[in-house]
Image: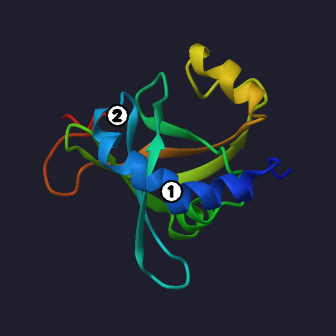
Amino acid sequence: MPIPAARRVARFNRMIGNRILGPITWWLPGFGRIEHRGRISGRLHGAPMLGFPTPDGQRIAFALTYGPEANWVRNALAAGEVVWRTRRGGRIRLVDPRLVHDPTRSAVPRPVRPALRVLRVDDFLVARIAPDRTAPGRQTATGER
């Protein structure tokens, strides 16, 4: 079910919010930049996003505040991967993105759940952290090895 006013909020963020938030994203805890390729254009897109490492440290969850129909979500699902850039300069490749409908919001920390409840957000994109292609070892949710 679409989130009320999600399209208007998305348009505002695309035009104004992302331009304000973009430069300070790196200094906000939990924020990073999600990078994805357009399904049709093939163009690289990026947007500030709040990501939540899962308790097992193997995945990152993103609350779908614009709903599961958002273009970035559709792009991620079509491509089967996205890149999550963190404030410490980490580049985390995320694969096997999946939509998760969870009214309990268990994919995010407890302090975040009430805000998502008020916003009526109970859909998430959860993706697995892929091994680094260029160096041995695995990446963690913080981008460190």
Q: Which residue is mark 1?
A: 16
**On the rendered structure, is 42 left or right of 64?**
left
Disc 2 crowd, CA 10 A, few/some/many (<14, 14-19, 20+): many
Identify the element where label 2 is drawn.
loop
Can residue 77 be seen here? The reply is yes
- The reply to whether discs 1 and 2 touch (Cβ–Cβ < 8 Å) is no
Helix, strand or loop for disc 1: helix
For image coordinates 47% across by 45% down, the residue present is 49
| Picture residue at 49% right of the left edge, 28% below the top | 54
Q: Residue at x 55, y 19 (%)?
A: 109
Question: Can I make out residue 33 in this image?
Answer: no
Where residue 73 sits: x, y (%)?
Answer: 60, 59
Question: 100 or 32: nearer the eye?
Answer: 32
Q: What is the three-letter code of the residue carrying label 2?
A: Ala
Front residue (pair 50, 79):
50
The amino acid type of the residue labelled 1 equals Ile
Identify the mark nearer the N-term, 1 or 2: 1
Mark seen at residue 75: none
Residue at the farthest top position = 111
Q: CA distance from mark 1 to mark 2?
A: 29 Å
Residue 31 position, x and y percent, is 40, 37
**Label 2: which residue?**
141
Residue 19: % across, % down: 41, 56
Q: Residue at x 48, y 21 (%)?
A: 55
Spot the residue most to the left.
135
The relative height of residue 125 versus residue 45 in the rendered view (above or below) is above
Image coordinates for residue 40, horizontal then vertical, percent: 55, 84
